[in-house]
Amino acid sequence: MVRWLVIAGVAAIAFTIYALVDVAMTQAPRIRALPKAVWIALIVVLPVIGPVLWLLVGKSKPAGPKTQTTRRPPDDDPSFLGTIDGESSDDRIKRLEEELRALDEEDQPSADDKDDDQDPKPSAS
């Protein structure tokens, strides 16, 4: 009989220590009903009832496993591919070359409009 009381006492102490460590390590947003200090006092004052109350009432249940959505690379994603315009690479290259040619023509200084801030060309001596 004494052996069972010793085993029950050790189990109660271990359960109380587990609950104290659990309260101390639990982040504040996950604690329900009472502040952390009150839960610690409750667990110490009521050795078996306090830890049971903590586990049943005080600690919020962890959220279920978060489902990770696997992301596809853009070249495999139909929704991404649908947003790309139908311009082929050859057409795009031609269009960009025309735009560059037009910009070059705009930037060509005329004979009377010579910039003074350009470095003079080195003379061939």
Image (tube, rainbow, N blue to C red):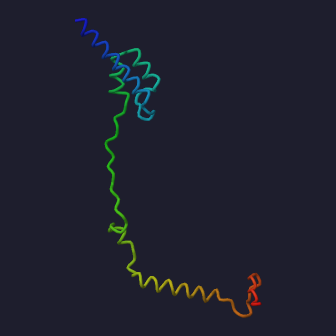
Residue at (33% x, 46% y) in the render: 66
Above or below, 118 against 2 in this view is below
**Residue 108 x %, y %:** 65, 89
Residue 11: x %, y % from top left: 30, 17
Seen as rendered, the residue at the extreme bottom is 111
Q: Where is residue 40, by image quadrant?
A: top left
- Farthest front residue? 125
Dividing the image into 4 quarters, which one contains the N terminus?
Answer: top left
- Image-based side of 100 in relation to 64, left or right: right
x then y, percent, for residue 16: 36, 19
> In the shown orientation, is residue 51 left or right of residue 106?
left
Residue at the limit of the structure toward the top, as seen here: 2
User: In the figure, residue 51 lies in which quadrant?
Assistant: top left
- Quadrant location of the C terminus? bottom right
Q: Residue 35 at x, y = what percent?
A: 46, 26
Point 34% across, 40% down: residue: 63
Observer-nearest residue: 48 or 73?
Answer: 73
Q: How many marks?
A: 0
Q: Residue at x 38, y 72 (%)?
A: 83
Quarter of the image holding residue 21?
A: top left
Residue that lies at the very extreme toward the left in this rendered image: 1
In the rendered image, the vertical position of residue 44 relative to residue 36, given as above or below: above
Q: Is residue 125 left or right of residue 90?
A: right
Task: Tell me if residue 119 comes above or below residue 11 in the rendering.
Answer: below
